[in-house]
Amino acid sequence: MKIKKPQIYTQILIGLIAGVIFGLLFPVHGDEIGIAYKEGTSINRKYLYGWQKASIEVDGSVQAQFEPGNNNKFIKSYELFKEKKNVRILFIFKDGKTEAYSNVVRILKPASLPVHLKPVGILFIRLLNFIAIPLVIASLFVGAASLGNIRRIARIGTKTLVYFLSTTAIAIAIGILLANTIKPGERLSVESKQKLMQEFAIDVAKIEEKAAQSSVVDFFVNIVPTNPFNALASGDMLSIVFLAVFLGLIAALIEQEKAKIVIKFFDSFTEIMIRAVGIVMLLAPYAVFVLIAAIISEFGFGILQTLIWYVITVIAGLCFHMLIIYPLYLKIFSKMPIHRFFKGIRPAQLVAFSTSSSAATLPVNMECCEKNLGVPRGITSFVLPLGATINMDGTALYQGVATVFIAQIYGQGLGIAGQLTILLTATLASIGTAPVPGVGIIMLVIVLRSVNVPEEGIALIIGVDRLLDMCRTVSNITGDAVGSVIIASSEKVLDFEDTIHHKDLN
Ligand code: ASP
């Protein structure tokens, strides 16, 4: 008897669950640490297990002491001392033994088995990103060029933007409301606050440095690239989107006989990229397995406990937005059955969760919306790349919660004006957030500044950012998919009846 091979969604799900189990089985232990130290001209690496206390000494006097479980702080603090003369690190082990090391060049995070396997996952993400940029440029160009006449372009463009902005504003409002109701900031002890502020101060400095690079106005002006090839080469998504839509729309305006050849070229190019996604997706179950295993094995569950109310608030908000708001939109503006929709985009959601990147997920999302939901290429190729870049409901919701949370911890009331300011700036910040992992927290700085909430408060939430990034990215790409369905439906081109026979939906 032939055993039926499980479909891609089931395979990825199995990969994800197995990854969680594997990650839990091989965690990175708090009392493991690596050191790279100079001996003569060579650099040796050594991993130490079972240490109980470590001290950094300069000229024989202790400068800082660390206990297991605080490796991040240990690693970062050492960076401040390593250039000094006569520095050594003294380790005291559980059995009372001591070991001292000088000429330490770097302290290293220990790597567990899952972390060693991570390159497979990185390869998968790189392949998806490799596809994403050519796909965005080609499909968005074709999408914009085939919107038809000016009236249709204006109609679809306006509908898309109204949808994006309305769902983003609702997402932020949900985030702010929940944060005001659950009050996660008032549930964090002063002791935990001090610990987090100390441990993550150095990361905040890096984030502030990145965020300081441009003002909001500069940011919007810079969307227009002076050299389109530079924008392409540096992978600057907003500029690429501008470039593709702008040129695509112009292609729709010139004589069709002349535009035809370029449109055809990009159309074939899109086809090649979409086919490439299908091939790369063969790696998905394995990649998801190693990515999730590595995240779980490295994740400090201690910090999750400390910030549990904050995490609950963000996740509750995301669930509400995904399970109530999107279905409402689908119900009101399309005939797509809700369960069909969620079934159809499950593979994309799993990839978003594992990669934390809307850009990497874009090719998969396009495939799901076209093949499983019956959204025609003409709509997906316009709405999805645009949405992946500027429509980030999950990120906006998270920025709303994070701002109120930090304000609560600093005992700062925000008032109605403050909350409205958050609504406005988080909308802009989410538009400006690049669709790659961890950018949401950088753009959060802009929201915090707009309501004068101390930026260093980011230290409080950075420890759980990776986890929340995974969750918010799922919401980000789901919002784009909903958009493509309701725009297609409103244009009467949604063809989901035809796709019901698609058994590969699983
Ligand atoms: N990782 C998110 C995305 O790609 C962006 C963010 O919130 O950091 O959609």
Image (cartoon, grey):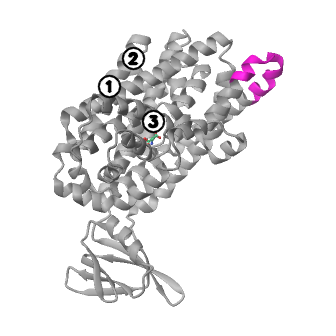
Would you name the residue on which mark 3 appears? 430
Q: Quadrant of residue 398?
A: top left
* First-in-chain label (3 vs 1): 1
Q: Quadrant of the N terminus?
A: top left
Q: Position of residue 152 (x, y in %)?
A: 62, 11
For residue 178: magenta?
A: no
Looking at the image, do the residues carrying marks 2 and 3 touch, with CB atoms under 8 Å apart?
no
Would you name the residue on which mark 1 appears? 323
Q: Residues within 10 Å of mark 3 (few under 14, many from 20)?
A: many
Q: Is mark 3 within 8 Å of ligand 1?
A: yes
Q: Confirm whether residue 275 shows in the render.
A: no
Would you name the residue on which mark 2 appears? 329
Say which element carries label 3.
helix
Distance between the alpha carbons at the discs numbered 2 and 3: 20 Å
Against 250, residue 112 (above or below) is: below
Give the residue type at disc 2. Answer: Tyr
Q: Quadrant of ligand 1?
A: top left
Q: Is mark 2 within 8 Å of ligand 1?
A: no
Residue range highlighted in magenta: 249-265
Against 91, residue 464 (above or below) is: above
